Image: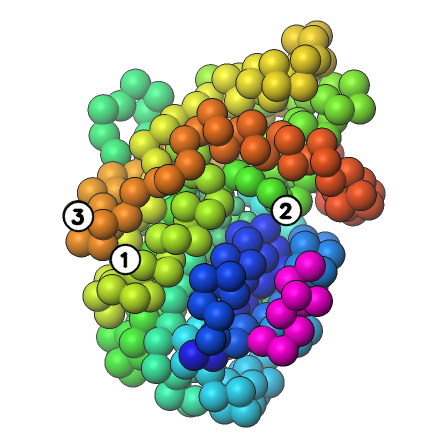
Amino acid sequence: MNVLVAGGAGFIGSNFIRYWLERHPGDRVLNLDLLTYAGNLESLADVASAHADRYTFVRGDIGNVDLIEHLLTEHGVDVVVNFAAESHNSRAVLDPASFFRTNVLGTQGLMEACRRAKTPRVHHVSTCEVFGDLDLDSTDAFSEEHPYRPRTPYNAAKAGGDFVVRSYHETFHLPVTLSTCANNFGPFQFPEKLIPLFTANAMDDLPLPLYRSSQNRREWLYVTDHCRAIELILEKGRIGELYNIGSGVEQSVEEITDRVLALLGKPETLKTYVPDRPGHDRRYLLNSAKIRRELGWEPAVGFEEGMRLTVEWYCANEAWWRPLKERLAVQEGSWGGR
Ligand SMILES: NC(=O)c1ccc[n+]([C@@H]2O[C@H](COP(=O)([O-])OP(=O)(O)OC[C@H]3O[C@@H](n4cnc5c(N)ncnc54)[C@H](O)[C@@H]3O)[C@@H](O)[C@H]2O)c1
């Protein structure tokens, strides 16, 4: 099988490519990525040499319909998985336009290319954040039927992309599935995101910038469990359906910070409280009963084990993340009058 992975040089996409090539020895993977500040081919350097005959990289924009149609046809692509997106909520406050360009219009370009090339199977990766947020004391969890109520430019743009994908299914019968996933963590995550940023800062005895609302909670999933869920959706998912992917494990930002500090043996005095990001969502929690019931998925890596693996990975891979810290686009807490 020939698989085109869009956004494969990012955090989850690179983990997915590694996962797929290991588990599907007969398949070829074509990685299409624009290499924005968040894309990094170093994340796949080992894969590119170990699987040189089955792995190809092409630099390109998911909005470039002609390029992608050509690639889909030339490589006989059977499956497209779309991870490509602008993904950092904090950066979306500073430059919302780039989020709508890639996450909505870019997604439309990719779907149009798939339609023209008659791609047999398309999967679009989305986020729990499209559903909006929950009260901290709510007993609710978002099911797949929950209305989309995005609150930030990032999650509004992701919601827009999801509607594009659904419209290509309903109108043009493009054989799509979608998934909305909880917060991921694991190796190769850009050090702008909470766990890698705090790990990297703590290793250097630098302050860890917590938002004042540090009791805000997220649901956490180890990245390979996300990859496995997408694999199952591709194998057994029903066309046109959305699947929630969540662990059910919630942790506040404060709890995550304490765990990073404990794993590294660093003092609590590194915690520094900064102004909240505008529109900062309080809490997300998914009801993942559908994927567990229909596809038999469940997480394999527990939260504590995943945190230990992640922090150990960042300790052992400074050469990977140190150059990326220079590229950080956002100073957390510097929202000015926004
Ligand atoms: N990280 C999470 O916790 C999480 C949770 C749920 C869903 N998601 C979704 O999963 C997907 C991947 O997230 P991530 O954390 O790996 O993001 P990331 O920012 O690490 O990677 C995104 C990748 O997309 C590429 N890209 C950006 N714009 C592009 C364009 N126009 N054309 C081609 N490539 C482009 C970037 O170069 C980068 O390699 C996103 O769609 C995101 O919304 C992420």
Quarter of the render that holds ligand 1: bottom right
Q: On the image, numbered disc 3 is attached to which residue?
A: 293
Q: Earlier in the sequence, mark 3 or mark 2?
A: 2
Q: Is residue 7 above or below residue 171?
A: above
Q: Is residue 257 above or below residue 65?
A: above
Amino acid found under the numbered disc labelled 1:
Leu
**Residue 14: x and y, percent?**
58, 57
Q: Residue at x 29, y 82 (%)?
A: 172
Q: Secondary structure at mark 1?
A: strand
Q: Is residue 151 above or below residue 200?
A: below
Q: Nearer the viewer, residue 196 or 165?
A: 196
Q: Calculate the distance from the C-alpha at mark 1 to the C-alpha at mark 2.
A: 26 Å
Question: In which quadrant of the rendered view does residue 308 lie?
Answer: top right
Residue drawn at 41 percent across, 75 percent down:
79
Q: Secondary structure at mark 2?
A: loop
Sequence order check, earlier mark of 1 and 2: 2
Q: CA distance from mark 3 to mark 1?
A: 14 Å
> Looking at the image, do the residues carrying marks 1 and 2 touch, with CB atoms under 8 Å apart?
no
Please say if the residues under marks 3 and 1 sit with CB atoms less than 8 Å apart. no
Left or right: where does residue 183 sit relative to residue 327? left
Three-letter code, disc 3: Arg
Which residue is pictured at 68% across the width and 13% down the height?
A: 265
Amino acid found under the numbered disc labelled 2: Phe
**The residue positioned farthest toward the left in the image shown:** 293
What residue does disc 1 label?
242
Answer whether residue 163 is visible to the viewer in this image: no
Q: Name the residue carrying label 2.
A: 188
91 inside magenta stretch: no
Of marks 1 and 2, the one in the foreground: 2
Q: Which residues are magenta?
A: 46-54
Q: Position of residue 198 (x, y in %)?
A: 66, 27
Does the Cβ of the disc 1 residue fall within 8 Å of ligand 1? no
